[in-house]
Amino acid sequence: EAQVTQNPRYLITVTGKKLTVTCSQNMNHEYMSWYRQDPGLGLRQIYYSMNVEVTDKGDVPEGYKVSRKEKRNFPLILESPSPNQTSLYFCASSPGTSGRSSYNEQFFGPGTRLTVL
Amino acid sequence: DAKTTQPNSMESNEEEPVHLPCNHSTISGTDYIHWYRQLPSQGPEYVIHGLTSNVNNRMASLAIAEDRKSSTLILHRATLRDAAVYYCILRPRFHSSYKLIFGSGTRLLVRP
């Protein structure tokens, strides 16, 4: 089944303890992205990757890191989490970037609910 | 980025058609109109998109005004499973970050 998977789905941690949220897609998509969703603020893009070894900042990148060593994986790293990073996180992927056509549908994962105490 | 305006919420009865409106008066000629929805406790999912002509797929229809300043997502027969937040999003034809800019959307309530 074509899908985007995220792990863990739920995580409670403490301030300063490094964590990684994994994202994997099995559709051979070139493009991957991370969003966070907060009440009243909607979904906002954190980082994105146009292909392997190509990543760039989205609208709210502070406090996050990403890497894209393989096409299928795009982990989100919080080196020193803080309470303001408590949020619902979604990973998304999209087929391709050739021609930068805008109509490619994005596939979203099920979300990771993170609480930082 | 061009902005969209949607009603905060709408209600429908099961098995009746639903028309979800979206205003986008500042749309540019190369912006695509996308619709996504987010079911409770799930990630957003693609519904439909269009540029100028009306579009149909297995999930819904998209009616685009002639001046492109508004569009309507049509669910032909609402089911309880269609209860979700529906987002109308404009995406430039060529966009370096591929990001989707989600507004607050329309929360659709479907009554049995």
Image (tube, helix red, strand yellow):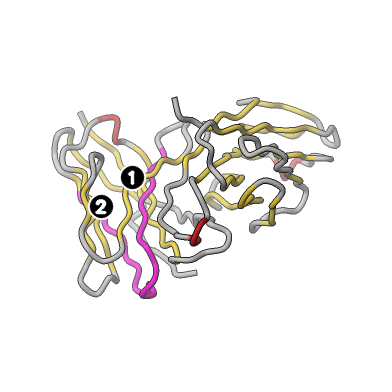
* A24 falls in the magenta region: no
Which residue does the image show at 16% across and 42% down from the upper left? B76
Where is residue B80? Give x, y as percent: 26, 30
- Closer to the camera, B35 or A74? A74
- Closer to the camera, B110 or A110? A110
Considering only vertical position in the picture, is B65 above or below A62? Answer: below
Q: Quadrant of residue A71?
A: top right
Where is residue B96? Give x, y as percent: 57, 63
Tag count:
2
- Closer to the camera, B5 or B69? B69
Q: Answer whether labels 2 and 1 touch (C-beta < 8 Å).
A: yes
Image depth: mark 2 or mark 1 in front: 1
- Give the residue pinned by disc 1: B47
Identified by mark 1, the residue type is Val
Density class for disc 2 (Cα within 10 Å; few <14, some 14-19, many ≥20) is many
Is residue B67 found left or right of B17 in the rendered image? Answer: right
- Give the residue pinned by disc 2: B73
Q: State which region is magenta.
A: B19-38
Where is residue A109? Give x, y as percent: 52, 34
Q: What is the magenta segment's predominant secondary structure?
A: strand
